[in-house]
Amino acid sequence: MAEIKYEIVETIAVLSESPKGWKKELNLVSWNGRDPKYDIRDWSPDHEKMGKGITLSKEDVQNLKVALENIN
């Protein structure tokens, strides 16, 4: 399996933290040298391991923001 390279360009928010120290974070991440995208996933305390997550374009994030603002 090919190695996945990543760089956390900016940490935007920590959404939650588990008792074991893993944090669900919203970050700007560059995957395999590509342009950074918004990313929500769990990270180990040292950012060496990660859980499954979701990667969003700027347009996706803007649409999500509108949708969240409409939640009562």
Image: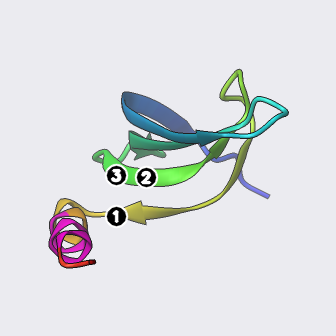
Characterize the local packing of mark 3: few (<14), some (14-19) or many (20 or more) Cα atoms within 10 angstroms.
many
Whether pointer 3 and pointer 2 mark residues with C-beta atoms closer than 8 Å, the reply is yes
Q: In this view, does 28 lie above or below 10?
A: below
Helix or strand or loop: what does disc 1 sit on?
Answer: strand
Q: What stretch is highlighted in magenta?
A: 62-69
Q: Name the residue under label 2.
A: 39
Question: Position of 21 compared to 35: left or right?
Answer: right
Helix or strand or loop: what does disc 3 sit on?
Answer: strand
Question: x and y percent of residue 48 in the render?
Answer: 72, 29
The Cα–Cα distance between marks 3 and 1, rounded to whole angstroms, is 5 Å
Q: Name the residue under label 3.
A: 38
In this rendered view, identify the residue nearer to me: 42 or 70: 70
Whether pointer 1 and pointer 2 mark residues with C-beta atoms closer than 8 Å, the reply is yes
The Cα–Cα distance between marks 3 and 2, rounded to whole angstroms, is 4 Å
Residue at 18%, 78% (x, y): give it: 70
Whether pointer 3 and pointer 1 mark residues with C-beta atoms closer than 8 Å, the reply is yes
In this rendered view, identify the residue nearer to me: 25 or 3: 25
Q: Name the residue under label 1.
A: 56
Identify the image quadrant of residue 30: top left
